[in-house]
C-alpha cells in the first residue's frame, strides 16, 4: 500500500497503501520519514507514527483482525502468513516450485465518475501491463531478478458510478460481487479515486481460500502511467501491490530484527524509505545498505528498480501453494 499524509476513517480489508497515522481496518500500513532524511528515527515497530508533509507509504494487508495504530503488519501477523505458506508447501512436496508456465491473466476494472473523473484510457491500461512485465522480468535494472512472472491483459471493464468511484471501500463488497472475474490465478485490478492519502492496496494469496471475493488489487487511478500523482505516476504502485498479491512483505518488515521480510537476499531495513535515500544504512549491524530501490519499499516510483532472486523464489512458492489453477 501507499499513503500520503491525509487522515480519514475509510475501512478496507485488503493489503495496500494507507494514510499516515490512521490504519485502515484490516490493512497494514507504515509511515515514513521526510524524504530529505530529516525525519525522526523510529524503532522497527512504530506505535506513534508521524506524517511530515509530502511523505508517502506503501502498505500490505494482514487479512482479518485488528492492526496496530501504525498500520504495519505485526511480527505475529507476518509469522502467521509465513507459517501458512510453509504448511502449504509441505503438502506439495511432489510439485515443482515455479512461476506459472503461462502468463497471468489480468482483468482491469476501471471505475469512474459520471463527469469523466477517473477515466483511464486503454493506452494507460496497456502501459500499466507493460510496466508489470518490465518490472517482473528484471528490465529496469541489471541487478534485477527475472521473476518468471508475465502478465497478459484479458479484459477491461468500465463502470460509471459516482459513489463507487469516490468511496470504493464503502462499496467494496458490491463492487467485487459484480465485477470480479476468474479464480485465484486471475489478477483483478480495480482503479478508482482513493483520496489524497491512499495509493492502493492488495490481498494476500493465503486469504483466497476463505475470502475469494476479496482477492485482487486496488490502485488509485492517477498512479497508472500517464497519471498526475506527483512522484507516483510511473505505474509502480501496481508493481508494489502485485508483489503483495504474490505474497511479498515490505522490505522493512520486522525492522532490523530477525527474520526481517523472510527473504534471504534483501538487507534488513529499520523503517520505510521516502523519496530515494540511496546509501542509507538504518541497520548498521546487519549486512548491506537499505534496499530503497526495491519494489517492496516505499520509495518514489522513479527510485524503484528491481526484485531480488529471493523475492522471485518466494513469489513462486506462493503461486505454487495458493494460486496455481491446478487442483490442490
Image (tube, rainbow, N blue to C red):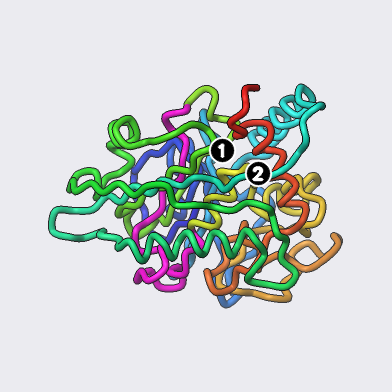
The residue that disc 2 covers is 101
Which residue corresponds to the image point at 38% horizontal and 57% vertical from the top-left?
197
Q: Count residues near mark 1 (Cα–Cα under 10 Å), then give few for <14, some for 14-19, many for 20+.
A: many
Q: Position of residue 147 (x, y in %)?
A: 69, 54
Q: Is residue 113 left or right of residue 50?
A: left
Give the magenta part as a residue range: 212-237
Q: Does the magenta segment cover residue 32?
A: no
Q: Position of residue 179 (x, y in %)?
A: 32, 37
* Camera-side mark, 1 or 2: 2
The residue that disc 1 covers is 204
Q: Position of residue 316 (x, y in %)?
A: 70, 43
Helix, strand or loop for disc 1: loop
Residue 52 visible within the image:
no
The disc, 1 or 2, on the residue closer to the chain's N-terminal end is 2
Q: Is residue 293 left or right of residue 36?
A: right
Q: Quadrant of the C terminus?
A: top right
Q: Count residues near mark 2 (Cα–Cα under 10 Å), then give few for <14, some for 14-19, many for 20+.
A: few
- What whole-number distance in Å separates the C-alpha atoms at marks 1 and 2? 21 Å
Which residue corresponds to the image point at 30% horizontal and 54% vertical from the top-left?
193
Which residue corresponds to the image point at 14% horizontal and 53% vertical from the top-left?
114
Which residue corresponds to the image point at 29% horizontal and 38% vertical from the top-left?
170
Of 93 and 302, the residue lying toward us = 93
Q: Is residue 14 left or right of residue 191?
A: right
Of 152 and 132, the residue lying toward us = 152
In terms of image quadrants, where is residue 290?
bottom right
Amino acid at each position: 500500500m501507499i499513503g500520503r499524509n491525509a487522515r480519514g476513517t475509510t475501512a478496507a480489508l485488503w493489503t495496500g497503501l494507507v494514510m499516515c497515522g490512521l490504519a485502515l481496518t484490516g490493512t497494514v500500513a507504515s509511515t515514513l520519514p521526510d524524504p530529505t532524511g530529516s525525519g525522526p528515527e523510529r524503532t522497527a515497530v512504530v506505535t506513534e507514527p508521524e506524517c511530515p508533509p509530502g511523505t508517502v507509504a506503501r502498505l500490505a494487508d494482514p487479512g482479518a483482525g485488528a492492526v496496530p495504530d501504525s498500520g504495519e503488519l505485526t511480527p505475529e501477523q507476518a509469522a502467521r502468513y509465513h507459517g501458512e505458506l510453509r504448511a502449504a508447501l509441505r503438502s506439495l512436496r511432489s510439485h515443482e516450485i515455479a512461476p506459472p508456465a503461462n502468463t497471468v491473466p489480468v482483468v482491469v476494472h476501471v471505475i469512474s465518475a459520471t463527469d469523466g473523473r477517473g477515466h483511464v484510457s486503454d493506452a494507460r491500461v496497456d502501459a500499466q501491463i507493460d510496466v508489470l512485465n518490465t518490472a517482473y522480468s528484471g528490465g529496469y535494472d541489471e541487478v534485477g531478478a527475472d521473476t518468471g512472472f508475465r502478465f497478459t491483459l484479458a479484459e477491461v471493464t468500465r463502470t460509471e458510478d459516482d459513489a463507487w468511484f469516490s468511496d470504493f471501500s464503502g462499496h467494496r463488497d458490491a463492487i467485487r460481487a459484480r465485477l470480479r472475474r476468474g479464480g485465484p490465478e486471475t489478477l483483478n485490478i480495480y482503479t478508482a479515486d482513493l483520496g489524497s492519502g491512499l495509493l492502493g492496496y492488495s490481498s494476500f494469496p493465503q486469504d483466497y481460500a476463505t475470502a475469494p471475493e476479496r482477492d485482487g488489487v486496488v490502485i488509485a487511478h492517477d498512479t497508472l502511467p500517464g497519471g498526475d500523482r506527483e512522484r507516483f505516476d510511473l505505474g509502480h504502485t501496481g508493481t508494489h501491490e502485485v508483489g503483495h498479491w504474490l505474497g511479498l512483505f515490505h522490505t522493512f518488515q520486522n525492522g532490523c530484527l530477525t527474520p526481517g521480510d523472510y527473504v534471504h537476499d534483501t538487507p534488513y531495513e529499520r523503517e520505510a524509505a521516502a523519496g530515494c535515500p540511496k546509501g542509507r544504512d538504518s541497520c548498521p549491524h546487519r549486512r548491506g545498505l537499505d534496499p530503497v530501490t526495491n519494489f517492496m519499499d516505499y520509495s518514489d516510483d522513479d527510485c524503484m528498480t528491481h526484485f531480488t532472486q529471493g523475492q522471485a523464489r518466494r513469489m513462486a512458492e506462493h503461486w505454487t501453494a495458493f494460486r496455481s489453477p491446478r487442483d490442490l
